[in-house]
Amino acid sequence: MSDAQTRIDETVKASDVVLFMKGTKDMPQCGFSSRVAGVLNYIGVDYTDVNVLADEDIRAGIKEYSDWPTIPQLYIKGEFVGGCDIITEMTLSGELDGMFADNDIAFDKDAADKIREANG
């Protein structure tokens, strides 16, 4: 495992929820990263953000680590969940709520319901 792969693996395992993204949770640098961070921020999930723009080795390495070609990438309890389209679908279906609940990760259910109401 390369140094970048080791750092990615340690990061994914150190936090319950990790988002590899372009930019930060407070200042996303692309629309897809902004959408996923916006959902997580809105529903009050405590997560670690990793700015892939700050480290080219991580930016390339995360795609290899997950065998997924795009960023952002969301991990819950060390498991790769998906990118922007998958997280959007899971949010709207309520499946993401279930993952958080099943893994004892705090989130605001009312806020998640409001997202679904606004997009119903």
Image (spheres, rainbow, N blue to C red):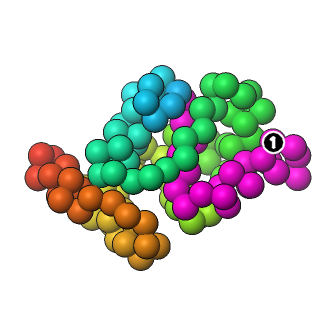
- Would you name the residue on which mark 1 appears? 4
From the top left corner, tell me how far across and down residue 46 is, in percent.
44, 52
From the top left corner, tell me how far across and down residue 88 is, in percent.
34, 49
Tell me if residue 68 is in the magenta stretch. no
Q: Which residues are magenta?
A: 1-22
Around disc 1, counting alpha carbons within 10 Å, would you say few (fewer than 14), some (14 to 19), or many (20 or more)?
A: some
Specify the quadrant of the image occupied by residue 30.
Answer: top left
| Left or right of residue 38: residue 7 | right
In the image, farthest residue toward the bottom:
102
Relative to 72, residue 17 above or below: below
Instruction: Tell me the amino acid under the disc marked 1.
Output: Ala
Tell me, yes or no, if residue 85 can be seen here.
yes
- For the point 30% across and 56% down, which residue is it? 91
Q: Secondary structure at mark 1?
A: helix
- For the point 18% across and 59% down, which residue is it? 110
- For the point 40% across and 42% down, which residue is it? 36
Relative to 54, residue 42 above or below: below
Frontmost residue, 93 versus 52 = 52
